[in-house]
Amino acid sequence: MSESEVLIIGGGISGLSTAWWLAQQGIGVEVWETAEHPGGKIQSTREAGYLSERSAGLLVNFRPQVDRLIQQAGLETRKQSRNDRLNRYVIHQGHLASVPMEIPAMAISPLWSWKGKLRMLAEILIPGGGSADESVARFITRRLGREILETAIDPFVTGTLASDPALASAQAVLPRLTALEQRYGSITLGMLINRVLKRRRANRAETFSFSGGMSDLVQSLASTPGIHLRTGLRATGIERIDGAWQVTGESAQGPHHTTTPQLIISTPADGAARLLGPLDRQLASLLDGIEYAPVAVLHMGLRRERIAHPLDGTGFLVPRREPLGFNGNLWMSNLFPGRAPEDHILLTSYLGGMRNPRQVEQTDQQMVTTLLTGLAPLLGIQGEPEYLRIDRHRRGLPLYHGDYLHRTREIRTLLTAHPGLHLCANYLGGVSVRERIHRGMQTARQIGERLRQPQSTHREDTGAAVTPIPIPTGSYIGTDRPGE
């Protein structure tokens, strides 16, 4: 039986980010990943001259901690930033309409009626209110009006989060906006104050990927000195014995056994529930109750000459009221170089989610037909695509629906009964790559503080003496800001 200072079950972006932050403190960490490659759903694929992403295709960041990881992990030279001058589109009355990014442009945009624009501008006069369990739909309607919800927020929530605005928790899905109301009484006033105070990163975000795709991030984290990654190893059971965690697993080489004082479970919620069921039925039940939305990602490659649209943007999102069979379309070869062969275009579309959960079960041909029926008239596409790739995720994204905040509070409360046990996955604290890196930092900091406790105190808690390990100066930068 081996021993590890910290064991992480799950080698997706949450587990690898946590491992990286632990390694920066000089803490040895072992990572078990069931698949033969790290990264979870994040995986870049090169074929036929195209570079496509199985899931997350980019990173949207405003956190200095993420900047620090990118720099210190040696990824700065591979970073590719999006051109901020590209248009951002949404479907409006059956056509592509540019989404204005500045308030003056909003005043003349055809996206909203004059009544809708006046309602939006009146937001600064709307008194604060709402409740902790307020939905996204109710929050946005109360603050900005129904037109903003239907035209801008609905396509964002359904297209990028595969969620339902009427069910999604506003505080969980839009914490930056709800935090502005809580602090300043108004979203508009809060943004203006932040701008006056030059808190630019609180209002502006940088969008980027890497020259080898998002897999560059995964591989860089996984190869960090101090991280021992074991792929093809599935955890089958955990026990608390003599103040330490004993973990068993199975691989092609046979059974594995490890003892650790600090255990992090970074699997999807149902995987965590399976492991914790024999230990804590109530905790396992709460985890098992977290729903996931099915998502399909369809990549399509075409010759540039077969598309009439100038493709002068990043892509577009689709509001619920528009009769199209997909949720959004990204023009990936516009966003970052090297995504398609010369004189070709890579278009990535998103289908399914809560808007159409059964769509993931369609055949490839059914999906392609659905997509082209809506996409071809919008972009002026002629002929059939020369490259196709479909990635299906039947449990794609966790849903922050209904009693999500209450459920996660209960989960955190029950965790206190299990010293040295931590949960760090995208069903807690945000689904974006940015938030997974940030939450990994928080988890690693908590563990580092625990391991630096006096041995007598730590022994009472875990039953095992642990050598204190210092954190290098400046390991953590600044204070937490409201998440996206």
Image (tube, grey):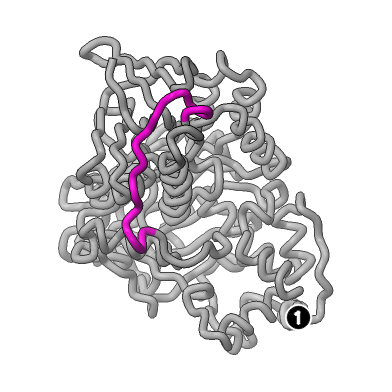
Horizontal side of 221 relative to 157 (left or right) equals left
Image location of residue 360, percent across then percent down: 48, 35
Residue shown at 75% from the left, 77% from the top: 123
Corner quadrant of residue 195: bottom right
Residue 42 spot, x, y in % from top left: 34, 44
Q: Does the magenta stretch include residue 471?
A: yes
Q: Which residue is drawn at 52% across and 73% down?
A: 202
The answer to whether 297 appears left or right of 164 in the picture is left
Three-letter amino acid code at the position of disc 1: Ile
| Quarter of the image where one finds residue 54 | top left
Please state the horizontal and vertical placement of residue 456, each as a whole percent of the image. 47, 32
Give 109 or 96, whichever is nearer the viewer: 109
Q: Name the residue under label 1.
A: 124
Q: Which residue is drawn at 33% across and 20% down?
A: 258
User: Where is the C terminus found, in terms of image quarters?
Assistant: bottom right
What's the magenta region?
459-475
| Secondary-structure class at tag 1 | helix
Q: Quadrant of residue 259?
A: top left
Compared to residue 310, the image places residue 118 above or below, namely below
- Which image quadrant: the N terminus? top left
Task: Give me the residue at 25% from left, 60% from top.
Answer: 72
Nearer-the-camera pick, 257 or 250? 257
Q: Examine the rendering and report whether any part of residue 267 can be seen.
A: no
The secondary structure making up most of the magenta span is: loop
* Residues packed near mark 1 inside 10 Å, few (<14), some (14 to 19) or many (20 plus): some
Whether residue 180 appears in this view of the structure is yes
